[in-house]
Amino acid sequence: MSFPIVRMRRLRKDENLRRLVRETNLSVDDFILPLFVRPGENIRTEIKSMPGNYQLSIDQLVKECTEARELGIPGVILFGIPEKKDELGSEAYADNGIIQRAVRAIKEKVPGLLVITDVCMCEYTSHGHCGIIKNGTVDNDETLVFLAKEALSHARAGADIIAPSDMMDGRVGAIRKILDENGFSNIPIMSYSAKYASSFYGPFRDAAESPPKFGDRRGYQMDPGNGAEALREVELDIKEGADIVMVKPALSYLDIIYRVKNRFNVPVAAYNVSGEFACVKAAELNGWIDGERVMMEILYSIKRAGADIILTYFAKDAAKLLNS
């Protein structure tokens, strides 16, 4: 059958009909809110390249987490800005590091909210790279030791999910091993499995104060031209013990999200990154686009591609719309 018997517009004529036949449904349950925490008290410093996002002291972080919980957002992911940095990123795995203290505060004061911790060295090292430098490059195998220590310190502080983002080979296995050996076998790992060397990370590096002091991260993050390699990375992480796999960024890699979801029977996360957020906000502030509609269109596209979980700086704004 064809036109005029078939008229596709019949099911588009009003909002209730559109809701009834909508193939992809977006929910607050899909969101994780990224947050940046730093030492101090009563600090709420807006990140200029990410309007509406802030570097927060722990007391302000707790308030932000309370609002997230009230909006129905299931969890947050934490990124730390340490008091001091050194060659070995020692504050990353210190028992009293900024993330460790932040986790304990949230678990005490905002019960019921999932706390995910990013595991990487870049925010804590004086050189800004994601691991230990030897002979001018990141030493993969030595870095694994420090990443495992960082993950264990987060677990001891009370983190619900560990999320390694460094892109070292073998880090999921190293983290799974140290967690299991220390009584944390029930803590899931959400691995940044297909993390691309993307220019969309620029605003995040302002927020986390983590740009590399020399070179770049293309030696360990993925080449944007590669797709099959992403499937290999995901498969290796699953074999090493990843419970959730992530594609980052999201919007320029919807095809990768789709391929990962169709290939592997595990939960798939996608990170709607800072540059993707900033582009929308800049255009909205200039009056070039309807920011709310573009935001929702982007989030629907990520969900439609196959993501089960969306890490997004839009989480609060989208939650307010979905809850209204």
Image: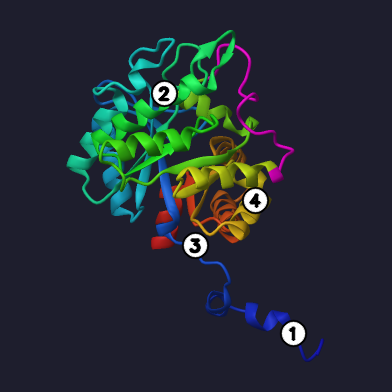
**Dot 3, crowdedness within 10 Å: few (<14), some or many (≥20)?**
some
Q: Position of residue 268 (x, y in %)?
A: 52, 53
Furthest residue to the top?
A: 135
Where the N terminus falls, by quadrant? bottom right
Q: Give the range drawn in magenta.
A: 211-228
Residue 302 shows up from this direction: yes
Please report whichever mark, 2 or 3, sits nearer to the chain's N-terminal start: 3
Q: In which quarter of the image is residue 264?
A: bottom right
Question: Nearer the observer, disc 1 or disc 2?
Answer: 2
Question: Nearer the observer, disc 1 or disc 4?
Answer: 4
Badge 4 vs badge 3, beta-carbon distance below 8 Å = no
Residue linked to disc 2 = 145
Mark 3 and mark 1: span between their CA atoms? 26 Å
In the depicted view, which residue is nearer to us: 289 or 310? 310
Please report whichever mark, 1 or 4, sits nearer to the chain's N-terminal start: 1
Mark 4 and mark 3: span between their CA atoms? 16 Å
Residue linked to disc 1 = 7
- The type of residue carrying mark 3 is Leu
Please report whichever mark, 4 or 3, sits nearer to the chain's N-terminal start: 3
Mark 2 and mark 3: span between their CA atoms? 39 Å
